[in-house]
Amino acid sequence: MYHRGEPIRINMDEQNTLDIYMEYIEAFESKDYHTIADRCRTPFFASSPSGTTIFGNREELLEGFSMLRSSLDADGYVGSKLNQLDFTSVAATAGTLLVDFHRVNHEGTLYFHGKALYLFQRRAKKTEMIGIVVLDDSTVSSLSD
């Protein structure tokens, strides 16, 4: 059997996925919503036990992340402490990243512990974040308020 073109991949690229996530979280902390939108594909979804929000286009995505980040500002959020990142390659074109994190306030105090599962997909040689499944009730609700 012969294959023409780029090498056949069995697994999604872990380092590339981690790089995209780190660019995303840095952009989230610095309120750079356009960089976030550049790392995500729409439609994009955010889901938690309290419900699911779907952002159909770039403008909705920008507005949703801005609203979420603004709600965290009220809590004094300045950043995230990443406790653990667990990557799983589902296929050559799909992967997940389970993130265990703490939110950090202006005083450097850890004030919230959470977990979220980020979904990534590769298409046309580009890997993008396609959704977030939040594993607690208090994170995504701010996206749809």
Image: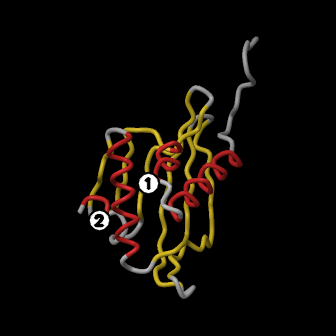
Rendering coords of residue 4 (x, y %): 73, 12
The C terminus is located in which quarter? bottom left
Amino acid under disc 2? Ser
Q: Residue at x 59, y 74 (%)?
A: 81
- Please say if 44 is above or below 82: above
* Residue under pointer 1: 132
Q: Name the side, left or right, on which 133 lies relative to 78.
A: left
Rendering coords of residue 140 (x, y %): 34, 63
Q: Residues within 10 Å of mark 1 (few under 14, many from 20)?
A: many
- Quick one: SS at disc 1? strand
Q: Name the side, left or right, on which 131 lies relative to 123.
A: left
Rendering coords of residue 37 (x, y %): 46, 45
Q: Residue at x 39, y 56 (%)?
A: 65
- Quick one: SS at disc 2? helix
- Please say if 50 is above or below 42: below
- Please say if 109 is above or below 117: below
Cβ atoms under marks 2 and 1 closer than 8 Å: no
Instruction: Give the CA distance from mark 2 to mark 1.
Output: 13 Å
Nearest the viewer among 145 and 73 is 73
The N terminus is located in which quarter? top right
**Type of colouring:** secondary structure
Can you tell which mark lies on residue 8? none
Looking at the rendering, which quadrant does residue 68 occupy? Answer: bottom left
Q: Residue at x 68, y 47 (%)?
A: 14
* Residue under pointer 2: 141
Q: Residue at x 61, y 49 (%)?
A: 20
- Mark 2 or mark 1: name the one nearer the start of the chain: 1
Rendering coords of residue 29 (x, y %): 52, 65
The number of numbered discs placed on residues in the rendered structure image is 2
Nearest the viewer among 103 and 33 is 33
Amino acid under disc 1? Ile
